[in-house]
Image (cartoon, rainbow, N blue to C red):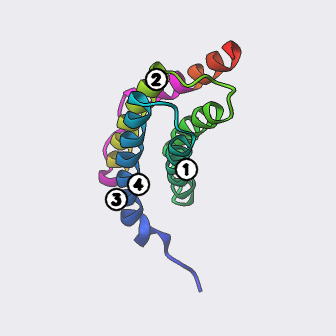
Amino acid sequence: MEIDLERFRETFLQEAGEHVAQMVAGLHELAIGDFNMRLLHAVLWKAHSIKGVAATFGLVRITEFTHAMRILLDSMRGGQVQVEKSLIDLLVEAADVLAAMLETARHGRPWPPEAEEMHERLTAARVAGAMAA
């Protein structure tokens, strides 16, 4: 018996949007308070979940984008990259771009033009942060 995954795509896109909103709320909380490993871990796993399910649906650009977010978050969690407000702000911007990418996938629109640049900024931040640590 073959399972038609496409019928679950819309549910994923809706839930992924909710995950992004929760990521942003968690990132804002990290930005205003003391470092909280549990909260950072929760944000990381939201990105990880979106990445994994996006891959299941063949949403390669979303998979790659959320992978870059997840790697930066994991580097922060592991201490290879220092947790700084500028990185939290970058991740909030990235979450906004991710939300736009999810809407793009949902409605078949062209990809947000800022997606590629943001992907590069996430990667550069991780590399620069690792070199500084």
> Which mark is first along the chain, 2 or 3?
3
Residue neighbourhood size for the residue with mark 1, other residues' Cα within 10 Å, grouped as few (<14), some (14–19), many (≥20): some
Q: Which mark is residue 16?
A: 4
Q: Which residue is mark 1?
A: 45
Up the image or down, 48 lies above or below 123; here it is below
Label 2 is placed on what type of residue?
A: Glu
Q: CA distance from mark 1 to mark 3?
A: 17 Å
Q: Which residue: 37% across, 66% down?
A: 11
Where in the figure is residue 110, as x and y percent of width and height? Answer: 34, 39
Magenta run includes residue 113: yes
Q: Which mark is residue 117?
A: 2
Q: CA distance from mark 3 to mark 4?
A: 5 Å
Marks 2 and 4 in Cβ contact (< 8 Å) = no
> Which mark is first along the chain, 4 or 2?
4
Q: Element under label 3?
A: helix
Q: Which mark is residue 23?
A: none
61 vs 123, nearest the viewer: 123
125 vs 5, nearest the viewer: 125
Segment tinted magenta in the rendering? 106-122
Q: Is residue 3 left or right of residue 128?
A: left
Label 1 is placed on what type of residue?
A: Trp
Marks 3 and 4 in Cβ contact (< 8 Å) = yes
